[in-house]
Amino acid sequence: MKKGRILVVDDQEQIIESLTEILSDENHEVLTARDGQEAIHIVQSDSPDVVFLDIWIPGIDGMQTLKAIKRIDPDCAVVMMSGHGTIETAVKAIKLGATDYLEKPLNLEDVLHLVDKAISGRSTAKRTRESRTNDPGVIIGTSHLAQELKKAVDEAVHAAYNVWFVGEKGTGKEFLARVVHHQGGKDRNTLVKLRCGTLSPENIEDVMLACRTRLPLAENARKGPGTFLLVRVDKLQEPLYETFSEMILSFGSQACDNGAPHWRSRLRLICTSLLEPSDLVKHHGFPERLADMLGQKTIRVPSLRDRREDVPLLVQHFLEEAASEFDRHLVGVDDEAMKRLCEYSWPGNIKELKILIEHVAMTAAGPYIQVHDLLIPKDGYSQSIDVQERVPFSAAAVAGPQNSAPLIAENSQQASWQPLAKHVAPADLHLQKTLRGRVVMYGQGLHSGVKTGLTISPMPPSTGIVFGHITSGGTVPALLSYVESTDFSTSLKKNGLLARTIEHLMAVFHVYGLTNLLVKISGEVPIMDGSAVDFCGLVESAEIITQDETIAPIRIAEPMELPMAPGSSKSLRVEPSDCLEIDYFLEYPPPVGAMRMVFRCESPDLFKTEIAPARTFGFVKDMRMMDEMGLAGGGRLSNVVLLDDEKVINPPLRFPDEFVRHKILDIIGDFYLLGRPFIGKIIAKLTGHSENIAMLKIINEKMRIV
């Protein structure tokens, strides 16, 4: 079997560890990523032969990541993985370019067979990605520092000396090392990368020997010696200095020029660090001879804040690149947004800028990026720079050929940006909120009956709650005007995209004050145990953060009532209150009977204790009818309280009045479809989703909310 470079993308450590062990035992080089954005960066920098990609990864989901990978490298074989997939999902993945689709738990023989097949096929395919990485790299920017950096890199390309890149995190040191390698006419197989921080007394000899066997030395290489890239030599442990020096010496030999003996390397050594070589020698005991061998030429990479006049060109390039990868129609950046981008101090440098633009490209409404699309703190500003006009896409404006590689950061742990600065909202306004990170949950659809799941991702201020489909790029806002159906649950629909059974999740968003989120599902929110308690735990696990914009709640100032048909026993009205308050009366034939509850939603903890655990309930006779309608295919004794004419079939109940509590849960969820927190008293008798939506339409008509 030909050995290859394999990327495993999954947020489950068990999957990553097992695949890494299996593939490493077959002598493949294994790279790993925990989310889609990290995976895309690795594909850009390391050009793997095969990618094992989980569909339900946080952030950029598996389908979006698949599309981006195929745009970057059409010849890369991508194998999709899922423990909760459907035929529809598998077909969609194959149509998007996936090589195959595997169900978890994975079969060892299937994995190795697909790897062997993919690597064999890639060896005869056109190496689109390699041809791109062998093109001359371009340092984007017109500043003096950018031009000086370009000059130094050009000199390093045409010289034989070893190079040491010094600079802050995220400045692009590893990218520049690859530029030096590829512009020298080398392909990816003659570059070997070692992260020095991973070396230990136990593994240093084995790791260095493995690297040496993969590196072509000068006397054995038809196209010249290989490149040994030593990432972060400043993270090398001090006890390893002597052994490391001896092994680096073994890569060269003694030579004599004009009577002066010196050490000559038989390959190109390039290293990176945050600290200057002289500081490492003086303050950290780094061997001076080793520093001289590695740093025959030192190139200092400037921070982005020191070349901030290059920010507009970098933004333009990254936005054009991201719009293509994520299939978004984006024209450019408006004046205010560009001004903020130029004034920000960029502690994570170019890497932080690139990650931010990728996030914006996925979430912005477009076609112009606006200031509220940016997740950067206002307190991170430096000097002011005037931005006179919008900057649209224009390949000609970028300093170099259209397909040239930009100066991006090394493929290490992703930079992150801080939550927006916190403010105190006026008494009549609420601060908008989102989640700090992305979360994933698996389950089963109540009505579809298929395995499903969801991802919840943070969104910029004033985005609102938006539902999307895991296998398509469309979205539907969680607003009254998009309600499609209220038969047994609340569903949204827009341009053919359907989001079903949203009420329990919406109730949690309502109570926790979450205003800006993207929820991706496979058509239906998973039912879980029939209650909302799992969703409470999910949002709490991600950490709720406030944003720097406010939202006005809906405050009921006068009573309003839903007209009912003559003789109807149902009723629904709203009236003023100081909080969200529900008074619900329920009456069914035995074994339910009559019950009433008044709930004042004064805190998430109270909701989580008193309302969220109440489960969906149904009658056996209704289940037969729903089955004929193609609904409740996922109803199980574990997620629905089922009743016949005499008793609860699957006791015990969580509360004696669990049924009325669940009705209150549904109301809290439905009443968030006006897009704002609701403050008022809701008095309901025998009503359901249809009456809730009808009442919202009356409120909206009188108050002109959405």
Image: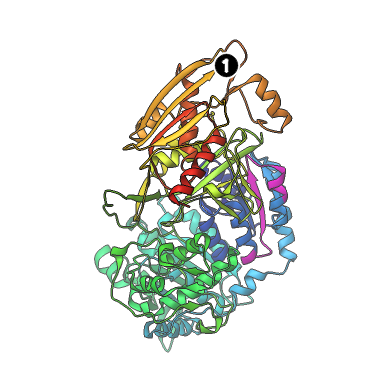
Q: Is residue 607 left or right of residue 666?
A: left
Q: Nearer the viewer, residue 319 or 248?
A: 319
Q: Nearer the viewer, residue 85 or 178?
A: 85
Q: Is residue 84 shown in magenta?
A: yes
- Residue under label 1: 650
Q: Disc count in the image?
A: 1
What's the residue at 47%, 70% (across, down)? Answer: 408
Residue 675 visible to the viewer: no
Is residue 610 or residue 562 the one in the foreground?
562
Q: Please, what secondary structure does the residue beneath circle 1 have?
A: loop
Is residue 89 placed above or below 379 in the rendered structure? above
Residue 306 figure quarter: bottom left
Q: Nearer the viewer, residue 268 or 546?
A: 546
Residue 638 position by quadrant: top right
Q: Which residues are magenta?
A: 71-91
Give x and y (percent) for residue 112: 69, 47
In this figure, which colouring scheme has been used for the structure?
rainbow
Q: Is residue 536 magenta?
A: no
Q: Position of residue 546 (x, y in %)?
A: 34, 50
Kind of residue indicated by mark 1: Asn
Query: What percent of the width, then of the height, locates residue 536?
Result: 43, 36
